[in-house]
Image: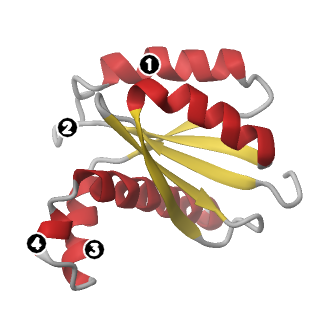
Amino acid sequence: MNEMARLLAIDYGKKRTGIAVSDPLQIIANGLTTVETPRLFDFLEEYLGREKVSCMVVGLPRQMNNEPSENMKRIEPFVNRLRKLYPHIPVVYFDERFSSRMAQQTMIDGGLKKKDRQNKALVDEISATIILQGYMESKRMR
């Protein structure tokens, strides 16, 4: 494991992509931002140019019946391109089935007003954070 390198989670969407990162000790997941998907590679290039990242976690969209969702058709080419551009950084999938629903619940529990809960960018960022938290917890259990 790289010392002091962050984990980066990506909740990939057609229009917007939520990004979350861990602290360098990989203990806490924090929402970082939401990027317009067409600008995602520019954002990653800039971010990875200044931060050490030891692994990228991409939310794996599945439907409740475990079938891949239609977003998967967009995610696979994205992940292939990521792996080509950053061969030194492992890219892993993590099941994100419940992340947007959990993001909504997290915002309700956190007392966010309805207007903020309808802020899709915020939902994407929180979803990415939940994906990252789930991934980090699953790693701790192993």
Mark 3 and mark 4 lie on one chain; the one further toward the N terminus is 3
Secondary structure of the residue carrying tag 3 is: helix
Look at mark 4 in the image and give the residue it sits on: 114
User: Do labels 1 and 3 touch, CB within 8 Å?
Assistant: no
Frontmost residue, 139 versus 27: 27
Tell me which corner region of the image, top left, top right, bottom left or bottom right, holds residue 55. Answer: top right
Mark 1 and mark 2 lie on one chain; the one further toward the N terminus is 2
Look at mark 2 in the image and give the residue it sits on: 63
Q: Nearer the viewer, mark 4 or mark 2?
A: 4
Mark 2 and mark 3 lie on one chain; the one further toward the N terminus is 2
Look at mark 3 in the image and give the residue it sits on: 106
User: Do labels 1 and 4 touch, CB within 8 Å?
Assistant: no
Mark 1 and mark 3 lie on one chain; the one further toward the N terminus is 1
Amino acid type, residue under disc 2 in the picture: Gln
- Image coordinates of residue 58 in percent, x first then y, are 49, 39
Crowd tier of the residue under label 4, counting other residues whose Cα lies within 10 Å: few below 14, some 14–19, many 20 or above: few
Crowd tier of the residue under label 3, counting other residues whose Cα lies within 10 Å: few below 14, some 14–19, many 20 or above: some
Residue at the location (35% across, 56% down)?
A: 127
Secondary structure of the residue carrying tag 2 is: loop
Q: Is residue 125 left or right of residue 51?
A: left
Residue 76: assigned label: 1
Amino acid type, residue under disc 1 in the picture: Glu
Q: Nearer the viewer, mark 2 or mark 3?
A: 3
Crowd tier of the residue under label 2, counting other residues whose Cα lies within 10 Å: few below 14, some 14–19, many 20 or above: few
Residue at the location (25% across, 74% down)?
A: 107
Q: Nearer the viewer, mark 3 or mark 4?
A: 4
Q: Distance of mark 4 from mark 2, alpha carbons?
A: 26 Å
Above or below, comparing residue 13 to residue 74 in the picture: below
Above or below, comparing residue 114 to residue 94 in the picture: below
Residue at the location (28% across, 48% down)?
A: 97
Amino acid type, residue under disc 4 in the picture: Lys
Tell me which corner region of the image, top left, top right, bottom left or bottom right, holds residue 108. Answer: bottom left
